[in-house]
Amino acid sequence: MKKIFQLTIILLTVCGMTFISQAQPDRSTSKVGTTAAQFLKIGPGARAIGMGGAYTGVSNDIYSVYWNPAGITNIQNSGEVTFNHSAWLADITYNFAAAALNVQNMGTFFVTLTNLGIPEDIVRTFDFPEGDGRVWDASSLAIGIGFARKLTDKFSIGFHAKYLREAIWNSSASGVAIDVGTHYITPFNDMVIAASISNFGTKMQMDGRDILFNYDPDGDPTSGVNNVLSKYEMGKYDLPLTFRLGLAMDAYKDRYFRATTALDAVHPNDNTEYVNLGLELAYDEMFMFRVGYKSLFLRDSEQGLTLGGGLNYRLADQFAVRINYGWADYGRLKNVQFFDVSINF
């Protein structure tokens, strides 16, 4: 157990040094658009969305695997499975699925699957502006496995390893990444202090037959070597490394009512820092209402108000169904809605 704790500290330190080395000289440079795998920045879970993405400290269900893998140790009973769907911006579809299992005296194991898809469209060229008979599409995929464990009854750690792949038409890029999280319940009204680092991994570089071309070294097609098969050199891009520090606490709680407040401070490597705020109101742990504000203090952000609700219905002592809905405002880009269904067993 001591070795696990030391490994966690080392990983957090290494990732922290990476942030320092990439520190921005001033807030006038946001570095927007400088990283690959942007789909990794879409947070799953209607509950988390409804609370404005302030979920690092709240994490106590299966969606912890994204926001803070250490929080997955707090799921009830033996395990949980979930599926999340969202009609994302511009007809893009976003799906997330996960399953977690508590193994006695060992910890919690989990698997995840994330998919983002752009629908097919016709290929347009200068000569064929209405289409040349071909179609193209694009997709992003992440497959992950992870493990979390309570080191004490108040402190837990978690790890999440992911294989990543992005494709557009006939080209693709792949990479690997890890997430690391910690979750600590303080003696002060059980307030939670949590931290996570997401997407620490390899660079990604596109490759495929779309970047191949024929090259004539001497520029004279009538002599010398002609039609040399060549390839454009594509750039290598970092993953969207993100550090989150979260606080969460039940501001009010009695037999029937609960009010949970949450705050996340977020430091991405491709933008300036911002804050997420969230509130969840629960009646009898069955009916939920949520409100939040996302990307507070982030310059030029289109995000803002979030709302959500949920129903937790227990069918038996060891079996419950959870249905959640989340709504997020994206300003001029309209809004995004999230739906998810989870089964706790």
Image (cartoon, grey):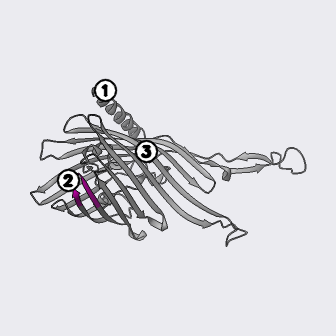
Give me the disc on residue 287.
none
Foreground: disc 1 or disc 3: 3
Q: Secondary structure at mark 2?
A: loop
* Residue at horizontal 32 percent and vertical 46 percent from the top: 68
Q: Which residue is mark 1?
A: 3
Q: Are marks 1 and 3 in contact (CB under 8 Å)?
A: no
Foreground: disc 1 or disc 2: 2
Magenta residue check for 317 = yes
From the viewer's perspective, tell me whether residue 76 is left or right of residue 334: left
Q: Is residue 120 visible?
A: yes
**Which tag, 2 or 3, sits closer to the chain's start?**
3
Q: Secondary structure at mark 1?
A: helix
The disc labelled 1 sits on which kind of residue? Lys
Magenta residue check for 109 = no
Within 10 Å of the Cα at label 1, are there few (<14), some (14-19), or many (20+) other Cα atoms?
few
Q: Position of residue 282 (x, y in %)?
A: 18, 61
- Give the residues in magenta: 313-322
The disc labelled 3 sits on which kind of residue? Gly
Foreground: disc 2 or disc 3: 2
From the viewer's perspective, tell me whether residue 160 is left or right of residue 247: right
Q: Which residue is mark 2?
A: 317
Q: Position of residue 305 (x, y in %)?
A: 30, 66
* Residue at horizontal 24 percent and vertical 51 percent from the top: 58
**Which tag, 1 or 3, sits closer to the chain's start?**
1
Q: Which residue is mark 3?
A: 144
Q: CA distance from mark 2 to mark 3?
A: 30 Å
Q: CA distance from mark 1 to mark 3?
A: 24 Å
